[in-house]
Image: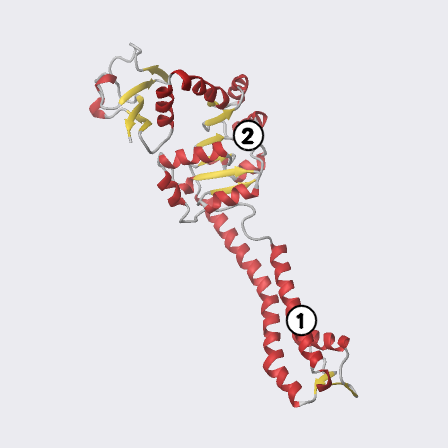
Amino acid sequence: MGSEWTGMENEHTGVALAHVEESPVRQVYRRVVFAAGVLLLTVGVIYLDRDGYRDGDDVGLTLLDSFYYATVTLSTTGYGDITPITPTARLVNILLITPLRITFLLILIGTTLEALTARSREEFRIRRWRSRVRQHVIVCGYGTKGRSAIRSLQANGTPLEQIVVVDPEARAIEEANSLGLHGIVGDAGRTEVLRRAHVERARAVIVAANRDDAAVLITLTVRQLNPSVPITTSVREEENANLLRQSGANMVITTSATSGRLLGLSTDAPRVVAVVEDLVTGGQGLDLHQRTVTSSEVGLGPRSLRDIVLSVTRGGRTLRFDDPLIGTLQPEDVLVVVRSH
């Protein structure tokens, strides 16, 4: 799993639907600082050779005159009231001030071009993503649980371009983008945010919020926008699990209770805990898989299969491996099995 996750970092294909590029204000501020530096350098050059210029009938420039001449020269305004009169001043204008003028203009023009190009490029990527996204998985929350869920999705074959992360923190989305994931900055409990994630087209939604009340609100909003999408949510307190189910969650995972049970087992049955950890850690050791019965397996008993069968789902009803109602396997049966990675 480690090698697969590391490979994600080498190719950035993610689209952020908010806050990816550097802020335009910061871009302009940086360019203005550079432009001011060029202006001050030009003023210094002119003032050092101030006796080589004429202002009307007066020879020589004050510091204010130097700022004025530098400003109208760099901006190519050129009123003509101040002119270089000595060969040295004219040579400095040719060899130094003219390149500074070009640099000054490139800085100002570059600010506009950079902002427009970056914005246009990102808008194009967003439009292309929105037109193509179908049957994707939305992960609400990019904390520890959300990142683990994404690793598991990738281990089970879900491509990165089919995973959309929603998180209120811009830094979390930037991190997700750096790994090649698509991200949206915003509260997943808000209707407009989920619509930007195209929840109506999603094949599944994972709610990995840090608070149970946030998980309830997200689940309710998702269910309102897409009545049929499968929703899996985590909850810290076991007493809130039923509330999540009533809110529309198809599956509720109680993190605190599950961790507590494993901690209790670790004292007297550490090997049980090790096997459980192995099962829930994809990509190594033993893996849990869900699959349909193959044609060659129809008519066989669950214990006749090479894979270890844990449950059989038939007609919407899930039967444990030892349930006598299973009998022999039938077409359309869905198995949960354990196999070696």
Q: Which of 332 and 87 is in front in this view?
A: 87
* Residue 309 visible to an observer of this rendering: yes
Task: Look at mark 2 in the image and give the residue it sits on.
Answer: 210
Task: Look at mark 1 in the image and give the residue it sits on.
Answer: 39
Q: Is residue 37 left or right of residue 203?
A: right
Q: Nearer the viewer, residue 100 or 216?
A: 100
Could you tell me the amino acid type at mark 1?
A: Leu
Task: Choose the circle earlier in sequence order: 1 or 2.
Answer: 1
Q: Return the x and y of residue 332 as percentages of the image width and height.
A: 29, 22
Which quadrant of the figure has residue 3? top left
Q: Measured along the vertical axis of the image, is residue 185 above or below residue 317?
A: below
Q: In which quarter of the image is the N terminus?
A: top left
Secondary element at image label 2 = loop
* Residue count near mark 1 (Cα–Cα under 10 Å), binned few <14, some 14–19, many ≥20: many
Q: Return the x and y of residue 232 as percentages of the image width and height.
A: 46, 27
Which quadrant of the figure has residue 105? bottom right
